[in-house]
Image (cartoon, rainbow, N blue to C red):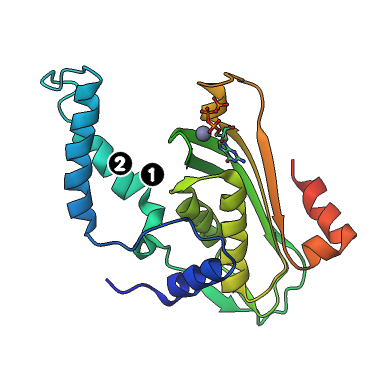
Amino acid sequence: MALSEAAIKVQAALKDRGLETPMLPKTSTPEQRKVKIEHHMREILTLMSLDLTDDSLADTPRRIAKMYVDEIFSGLDYENFPKITVIENKMGVDEMVRVQDISLTSTCEHHLVTIDGVATVAYLPRTKIIGLSKINRIVRFFSQRPQVQERLTQQVLVALQTLLETKDVAVKMDAVHYCVKSRGVMDSTSSTTTTALGGIFKSNPATRAEFLHQVK
Ligand SMILES: Nc1nc2c(ncn2[C@@H]2O[C@H](COP(=O)(O)OP(=O)(O)OP(=O)(O)O)[C@@H](O)[C@H]2O)c(=O)[nH]1
Ligand SMILES: [Zn+2]
C-alpha cells in the first residue's frame, strides 16, 4: 500500500529533526511479522515454564503478536498513519484552538509496559485548520509505538507543525509510567509532565502562559 502524502511529509520532517523513532526498514508484511512474533512469544513463555497446552494460555502467543502488530505498536508502520483532513482557513480564525484531556496510552520502550496519561494540544491557525478528531488520532498514532514520553511529545508537535504549516503548536502530556509504578521503584503516586512548545508558544510569554495555565 502506498503511504499517504501526510504520512510521507510527517516522516520526512521527523527524520530531518532527528526525532524519528529508531527503526529499521520493513522487510515483511504485517501478517508475516505476526507469524514470527507468535513463534518467538511461544518460546519466551515456554522458557518461563508456562504450559501452553492449557486452554487459557494456548492462544496467548498469537494474541500478543496480533496486539503488537495491529494495536499497541501499529504506529511503527506509516501505512497506519491516520487519514488527515486539513482545510483552508477561509474564515480567518486566529485565536488559539485547544484540545484537552486527550487520552493517551503508550508503551515505555525500556520495559515495554504501559504509559497511561492525557495530552493537551493547541495551535494558532495560520493558513490551515485540521479536523479536531485528527489531533486525537495523531496523538494515538505516535502513542502506538514503544516510546519515551519526551520523544512522543515532540513527535506530535512536529507532525502537527508539518500538517498545519505553522510553528505555532503546543503539546503537553501528563502520564503515569507503569515501569515506575508496578516494578522498579514501585512509586504509585508520581506522574511525569512533558511539554513541547513551538513558535509563538515558545517565544511569547503570554501565549505560553495562556496555554500552560489553562491546562489542568
Ligand atoms: N526520560 C525518560 N525515562 C524513562 C521513560 N520511561 C522509562 N524511563 C526510564 O528509563 C530508565 C531505564 O533505566 P535503567 O537503569 O536502564 O533500567 P532499570 O534498571 O530497569 O531501572 P529502574 O526503573 O530504576 O529499576 C528508568 O529510569 C526509567 O524510569 C520516559 O518516557 N522518559
Ligand atoms: Zn520503562
Q: Position of residue 94 (x, y in %)?
A: 76, 73
Q: Position of residue 59 (x, y in %)?
A: 17, 30
Query: Which amino acid, mark 1?
Result: Ile
Q: Which residue corresponds to mark 2? A: 67
Question: Tag 1, which secondary structure?
Answer: helix
Residue, x 47% and y 34% (percent of image)?
114
Q: How far apart are marks 2 and 1 (CA)?
A: 6 Å
Depth check: give the residue in front, 130 or 26: 26
Q: Which residue reaches farthest right?
A: 206
Judge left or right: residue 146 versus residue 13: left
Judge left or right: residue 180 versus residue 122: left
Residue, x 60% and y 20% (percent of image)?
188
Depth check: give the residue in front, 41 or 58: 41
Judge left or right: residue 92 versus residue 139: right
Q: Is residue 85 visible?
A: no
CB atoms of marks 2 and 1 within 8 Å: yes
Residue, x 50% and y 46% (percent of image)?
147
Disc 2 crowd, CA 10 A, few/some/many (<14, 14-19, 20+): some
Judge left or right: residue 187 versus residue 69: right
Place residue 43 in its image quadrant: top left
Q: Which residue corresponds to mark 1? A: 72
Q: Where is residue 137 in the image (x, y as percent from the top left)?
A: 49, 56
Query: Which amino acid, mark 2?
Result: Met
Q: State whether residue 103 is above or below residue 78.
A: above
Comes first in the chain, label 2 or label 1: 2
Disc 1 crowd, CA 10 A, few/some/many (<14, 14-19, 20+): many
